[in-house]
């Protein structure tokens, strides 16, 4: 008998015959509504609850899908970088309208968040017990994402960390000693952080003093005794790979190259910019090494109570020709990851079962055999697709006045030519076409926090079939794609405007 997961086409036939997803739907909770698309391959989306919004959400989720979207940005008509306002207060402010919408949905409903939060858990278990929660709790996530725990457990798990990695309380951290030990710079990571917020690169006394001041303010009285992970700065590119703890084993995804902290685009050296699956530059041995690490981590996670999708970020060293030499684990993301929201589409384009299916299979306890998952891993091909986030550059409050909408585009010289509607890479027909999507500024949106006009706000995504990293130095965008990012940002035509109070929404 053939495996039900030998292809996406086969899976859809088998799941229909067995009724795996019949009379069932998903509520997706995340930063961007596009993330709901990764589950739309299998189930209808009953509702989306998200921080951000976008013109593509109006067109493709609310209109085409007929799915209600409850969005902090849609309500406030402001986009800024303080996610805590959405995470901590949105359910308290909007629970009645969310519950009213869900009351109209028939059948079983699965709440699948990008990551858990205490306010989300309170909503699900106290206000909406009908929802089945398909994610790990905050306690479990925090335990496995503790970067100091990973340093303690790496040897037991059997995964590589940089040989000079160390743990130290802040009270014992000395810049002079560390810069002597790591003359090319070093990295300090606090136990818990996301989106680069707790990872700091230090190359000078000024960098060190800035980090210490920030962490004293953040940690307060616990600063001195907080243990941090310290690693040397490694000059190689950042790699990422996603796995899924499912039915006692681990499913893997194609690895990708992450673009992080390109100084031409962002000021934070740890800020995520994009991912490149199209480069496919790993040797078969390096690819297998990444997969073996993912499997070891997944088995360790599963043996300690974790379920479903997770991601692993990798550090690397390179030789004088920028060829990879060594691969080390940087951190575990015990949740869905940034690549998840579009990787499912990239996989579906190759008729591969998207990794998000295995997340559903784990929580629904579907009959997917371990030997079929092992075969899936062994036969997994590479995929094509890249995504890059365009951030705002200047501090202040702005409107996008260029009239850019989501859709399939191509470049003609330095002009953007819109070809047709679309919002996922699968809407393109060849590598000359690309998609503008995921947060496209919409009418009446003010970009920038009213109090301090934050900079580095995500504006829009470009998705392309092409590789976007520099062909030699994978840490940065290629010259072609740096130019393309600037062309799209210029086309948005951000114009200064009066701030909008968050009290208005």
Image: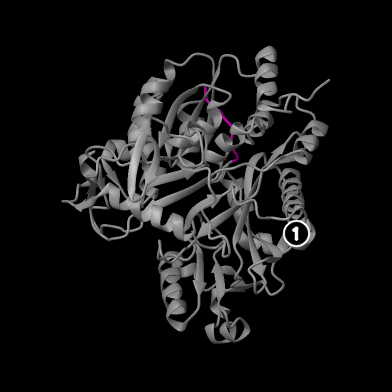
Q: Does the rendering let one see residue 224?
A: yes
Asked if 496 appears above or below 206 in the picture, the reply is above
Q: Position of residue 313 (x, y in %)?
A: 61, 56
Residue at horizontal 72 percent and vertical 72 percent from the top: 163
The question of residue 214 being in magenta is answered with no
Depth check: give the residue in front, 322 or 149. Answer: 322
**What residue sits right under mark 1 in the picture?**
159
Most common SS among magenta residues: loop
Asked if 97 appears above or below 283 in the picture, the reply is above
Asked if 353 appears above or below 221 in the picture, the reply is above
Magenta extent: 130-136
Residue at horizontal 37 percent and vertical 33 percent from the top: 419
Depth check: give the residue in front, 475 or 197. Answer: 475
Q: Position of residue 472 (x, y in %)?
A: 58, 64
Element type at mark 1:
loop
Depth check: give the residue in front, 159 or 433. Answer: 433
**Counting other residues with Cα less than 10 Å from the Cα at mark 1, is it few (<14), some (14-19), or many (20 or more)?**
some
Direction from residue 74 to residue 48 in the image, left or right: right
Q: Quadrant of the N terminus?
A: top right
Furthest-front residue in this view: 413
């Amino acid at each position: 008998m053939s495996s039900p997961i030998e292809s996406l086409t086969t899976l859809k036939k088998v799941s229909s015959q067995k009724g795996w997803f019949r009379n069932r739907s998903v509520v997706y909770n995340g930063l961007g509504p596009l993330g709901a698309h990764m589950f739309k391959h299998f189930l209808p989306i009953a509702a989306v609850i998200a921080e951000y919004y976008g013109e593509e959400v109006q067109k493709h989720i609310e209109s085409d899908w007929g799915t209600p979207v409850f969005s902090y940005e849609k309500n406030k008509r402001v986009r800024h970088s303080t996610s805590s306002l959405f995470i901590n207060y949105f359910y308290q402010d909007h629970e009645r309208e969310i519950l009213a919408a869900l009351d109209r949905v028939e059948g079983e409903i699965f709440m699948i968040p990008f990551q858990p939060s205490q306010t989300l858990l309170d909503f699900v278990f106290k206000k909406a017990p009908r929802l089945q929660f398909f994610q790990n709790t905050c306690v479990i996530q925090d335990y496995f994402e503790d970067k100091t725990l990973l340093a303690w457990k790496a040897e037991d798990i059997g995964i590589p960390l940089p040989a000079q990695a160390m743990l130290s309380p802040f009270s014992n951290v000395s810049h002079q000693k560390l810069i002597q030990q790591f003359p090319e710079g070093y990295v300090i990571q606090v136990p818990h952080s996301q989106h680069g917020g707790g990872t700091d690169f230090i190359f000078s006394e000024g960098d060190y003093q800035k980090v210490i001041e920030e962490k004293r303010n953040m940690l307060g009285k616990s600063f001195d005794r907080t243990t941090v992970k310290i690693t040397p700065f490694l000059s190689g590119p950042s790699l990422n790979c996603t796995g899924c703890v499912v039915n006692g084993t681990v499913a893997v995804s194609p690895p990708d190259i992450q673009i992080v902290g390109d100084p031409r685009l962002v000021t934070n050296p740890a800020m995520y910019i994009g991912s490149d699956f199209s480069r496919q530059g790993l040797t078969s041995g390096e690819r297998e090494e990444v997969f073996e690490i993912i499997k070891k981590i997944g088995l360790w996670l599963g043996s300690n109570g974790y379920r479903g999708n997770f991601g692993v970020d990798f550090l690397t060293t390179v030789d004088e020709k920028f060829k990879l030499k060594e691969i080390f684990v940087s951190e575990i993301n015990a949740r869905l990851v940034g690549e998840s929201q579009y990787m499912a589409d990239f996989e579906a384009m190759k008729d591969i079962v998207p990794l998000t299916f295995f997340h559903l299979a784990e929580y629904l306890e579907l009959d997917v055999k371990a030997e079929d998952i092992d075969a899936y891993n062994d036969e997994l091909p590479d995929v094509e697709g890249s995504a890059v986030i365009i951030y705002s550059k200047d501090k202040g409050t702005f409107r996008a006045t260029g009239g850019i909408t989501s859709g399939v585009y191509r470049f003609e010289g330095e002009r953007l030519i819109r070809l047709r509607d679309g919002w996922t890479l699968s809407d393109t027909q060849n590598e000359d076409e690309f998609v503008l999507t995921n947060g496209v500024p919409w009418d009446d949106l003010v970009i920038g926090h009213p109090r301090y006009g934050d900079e580095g706000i995500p504006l829009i995504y470009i998705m392309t079939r092409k590789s976007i990293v520099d062909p030699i130095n994978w840490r940065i965008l290629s010259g072609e794609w740096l130019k393309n990012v600037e062309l799209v940002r210029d086309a948005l035509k951000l114009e200064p405007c009066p701030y909008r109070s968050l009290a208005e929404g």
